[in-house]
Image: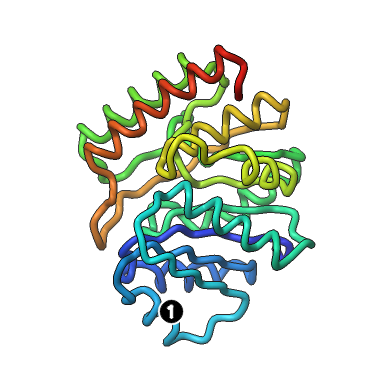
Amino acid sequence: MNKIAIVIPAYNEDKNIIKLIHEIRKITKAIIIIVDDSQNLKTKKIISSFKIKNLYYFHRGKKLGRGSAVIFGFKKILKKNNNLSCFVEMDADMSHNPNELLRNVSFFYKNSLDLLIGSRYLPKSKIINWPLSRKILSKLSNMLARILLGVPVNDYTNGYRFYSKRAVKTLVSKCNKLGGGFIILSEIILVLYNKNYKILEIQSIFKNRVRGESSVNLRLVLESLNGLIKLYLLKILNKI
């Protein structure tokens, strides 16, 4: 696990971030990159109060989008370390279980993958404590993405992912053309699939946040739907 970097986008996650970091550190000494878009400095102050090795913190101070934050983190770590072989992204709100890291990394290497998606929509996967409306919206969004984009995966929108170095180099140069939010997750899948990169999914248990507030709102949902339509148009025009 010493050739792994974990990028964690954060927005007002001062109530969750240290707990997540400590849970990760119980499992691995992998490099951790926090990209904080909070306008306040609460997360920065909390992280600064702990001496955590192999951790890089970047405060952008403006909500530029989750996908944008991940790409920003990948760019930074590519410049700092050239010996990495697996790049991970996961949410800061404890919805992605750190205890799945070792299993997922092992599966990633064993199958020589370019992208492994922790999927909420495989037979052994679970979603815990989401309201029914959120489950329906997520399921319908993923069904629509699969119909429009045609990539044979079940979960386009979960941000628990594991990438090869060549996949990361591709996505930082090719993606983030349709806005910095959640649409980047679907954009990455389409870009990597079109390059014949190897993509698989693995079951995952997704748990709704306990502390803090979700940044997902109606505006973000509409932006993602608009981005999905744009992705579809780029696909049929062979521009992506």
**What residue would you read off at disc 1?**
47
Q: Decide which of 133, 106 is in the foreground and name it.
A: 133
Q: Quadrant where the C terminus lies?
A: top right
Identify the residue at image location x=72%, y=39%: 113
Report whether 157 appears left or right of 162: left
Identify the residue at image location x=57%, y=32%: 189
Report whether 179 appears left or right of 102: left
Q: Decide which of 184, 50 is in the foreground and name it.
A: 184
| Residue 92 visible from this viewpoint | yes
Q: Is residue 67 above or below residue 24?
A: above
| Residue 107 visible from this viewpoint | no
Q: Is residue 142 above or below residue 60?
A: above
x and y percentages locating residue 218 in the rendered image: 22, 37
Inspect the image, locate mark 1, and give the three-letter code of the amino acid beneath it: Ile
Category of crowding for the residue at label 1, using alpha-carbon neighbours closer than 10 angstroms: few (below 14), some (14–19), many (at least 20): some
Identify the residue at image location x=35%, y=40%: 127
Which corner quadrant of the image does residue 237 belong to? top right
x and y percentages locating residue 104 in the rendered image: 61, 48
Identify the residue at image location x=46%, y=14%: 147
Q: Secondary structure at mark 1?
A: helix
Report whether 137 appears left or right of 174: left
Q: Quadrant where the N terminus lies?
A: bottom right
x and y percentages locating residue 88 in the rendered image: 59, 53
**Display colour scheme:** rainbow
Which corner quadrant of the image does residue 228 belong to? top left
Which corner quadrant of the image does residue 10 belong to? bottom left
Total count of labels: 1
Q: Decide which of 232, 17 is in the foreground and name it.
A: 232
x and y percentages locating residue 11 in the rendered image: 35, 60
